[in-house]
Amino acid sequence: MIQYFIPFLNGLLCVGLGAFVLSENRRSFIHQTFFFGMIVLAMEELFNGMVMKSGLPTEVLYWRRWELTAVAPLSAVWLLFSVSFGRSNYKELIAKWKWVAIAFLLFPLSMVTIFIDAFFILPDPLEESAILVMPLGWSGYAFYLFDLVSSVVILMNLEETLRATAGNKRWQIKFMILGVGGLFALEVYTASQTLLFSSIRWGMGPINSFAVLVANVFIIFSLMRNRFLDVDLYFSRTFLSNSITVAVVGVYLLAVGILAKAIGFFGENGAVPVGMFFVFLSLLALSALLLSDHLRQEFKRFISRNFYRSRYDYRKEWMAFTRQTTSLVEVRDLCSVVTKKVAETLGTPSVTIWLIDEGTDLVSLGGSTLFSDSNILGLSNAGKVWGALLAMARENPVPFDFASPTLAAAKQLKESYSDYFDEARIDHCVPLIAGKQLLGVMTLGPRVMKEAFLVEDYDLLKTIADQTAGSLLNLKLAQHLMKAKEMEAFQTLSAFFIHDLKNVASMLSLTMRNLPAHFDNPEFRSDTLRVISQSVGKMNDMCSRLSLLTRKLELQPAEVDLNELTTAILSEMNGSIRSMLIRNFRTVPKCSVDSDQIRKVIVNLVLNANDAVSQQGTIRVETDQVDECVVLSVTDNGCGIPKEFIERALFQPFQTTKSEGLGIGLFHSKKIVEAHHGRIQVESEEGVGTTFRVILPIHQSGQVNGRKYEV
């Protein structure tokens, strides 16, 4: 008699508890969900009591169908409760779970309404023995299969809520979680048994009623502690991911349910060996899932990214990181700022960046919140440790957990050098990789609160590490570029000096070559002494002006007659020119130029023309005035310059067509002319000859435009 009484008592308790909670706050979603969940339980118990009270098979079948109809929305309602209970961000979670909740509602309802005729396989006429064991049809099997999966999901959410609390909050909700969770834990058991034997057994009804009674007692205890159900929590990502064990157990029980079908298919004779084999395979699959690090990590990432509000405000963190690092131009400064930023953000007092020395596997201290150059205690070059650690970072460029290592290589390395890892405060390691190049690693010690690093922590660390690596690579490339420019400037400076020295040496060489033949000529000796004296003066002047070549030319302009300057230069080059020299100087006004600098231009152009012609060639030097400019032309009938070279490289440094040239003269000449606001033009044809025109404004304040001058 008592077994009939308990279901009806449960129904009254469920309705009373639901109404009491709803009356406390009718507008609260969690209160509304709890109310509807308790009403569904009450209806289930009411019809369960009617099933147990009935005596005729037809009555049992009638009330059993009503019980199943009442049970159909149970999973959907309690899923919403499990998602929203204790969740400050329950609206976001409900939006994510809404399609699951709809499926939890519609699928069971369709099985007990549309496909109710396929729910049981019953004899006709209905016998009394059939109500004790009611075989399932395909619809009933699908119903309980779905019931098993949904119960596991609800348990996962309830477990997460309980494990997310501590202290007084856990005290408030513990019995609520145990009460509701106990119901669905029993649901997992009853559903699995129903699937295993492919039938509903009469003895399950009283067991369910006793379970609901115990659950109601737990719920009453919980409501005495916290009748408003107002516990607001934000959840750590570890809780649901750790419930993967519950999910795998659900999958395993699902596999055991399939065992019943296998037994029925193979018959009684093959049932035992086939069943044992199937269970063996299920255990192997369960073990493989539990031991799969990759699957566990992917599951954690999926849960973290799809069902939870972000632990970090990435926009805020990114803006803070870029603001603090954008203006840094030194590697040590960057490393110092990054380590402090990571320490503050993740609550880890020990953060160090170790940089790899180029060309070696040795590491040096980049920046640290713990160590300095004077107290790294020999940590920077422990060869075996860092060799193995860097090799592991190159093979697996992901963050490593050395505090609780799961990767075999990390575990072995930690065990082999545990003292070193403790001394260096290495619990976590993040490779710094940019452009497929390992630049170093960032190591982190334990947190102040001893919390484990979660998936989202590693995601943020990886983002910071990638950005830091990119910045480090840019800084290193900038340093290389600066050194290259310094070397280029040195080479340019040297080339200028050598070029001018070569011109002086060429004049001295030509003079010394003619000295034996004309030594007795007093006039020649006088010219020789003058050339030597001028050469020494030029070399002294080159030394004094050497520093000016790396920056903008500082001119010392004066009124100069270009005809007189050119005549003097050609006279100094007497004996240095092997070809016929033709002069055609027209009357030109004086112009404001630096005579020493323009001298270099004229000497360079004449010597270039001399190199381009044979001994039977001619060099024509002319002056003229066009508008407000004076024009100096140097023309030869030598080999000419290729058109392609003129377009691409003529006035570029270190570009030349001469086998012994340095490629500096025309670049230097162009720089001098442009410093005078002038311009150099060239016309050349291979095998015919070349003409260079130097166009200078008469007044220094003038500017030569880009038009071509016809002389």
Image (tube, helix red, strand yellow):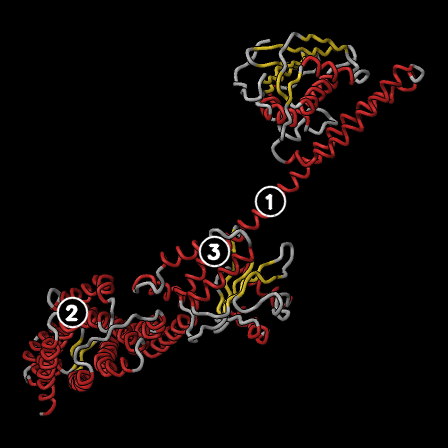
Q: Percent x, y for residue 517?
A: 92, 16
- In the rendered structure, the answer to whether residue 151 lies left or right of residue 466 reads left
> Which residue is nearer to you in this view: 527 or 396?
527
Residue carrying label 3 = 466
Q: Quadrant of the C terminus?
A: top right
Q: On screen, 369 above or below 650?
A: below
Q: Is residue 86 left or right of residue 668?
A: left
Residue type marked 2:
Phe
* Viewer-closest of 483 and 297: 483
Number of numbered discs visible in the structure rendering = 3
Query: What's the mark number on residue 482?
Result: 1
Front position among marks 2 and 1: 1
**For the residue marked with disc 1, what is the amino acid?**
Met
Quadrant position of residue 59? bottom left
Q: In percent of the image, x 15 and y 84: which residue is there?
A: 209
Dot placed on the residue nearer the N-terminal end, 2 or 1: 2
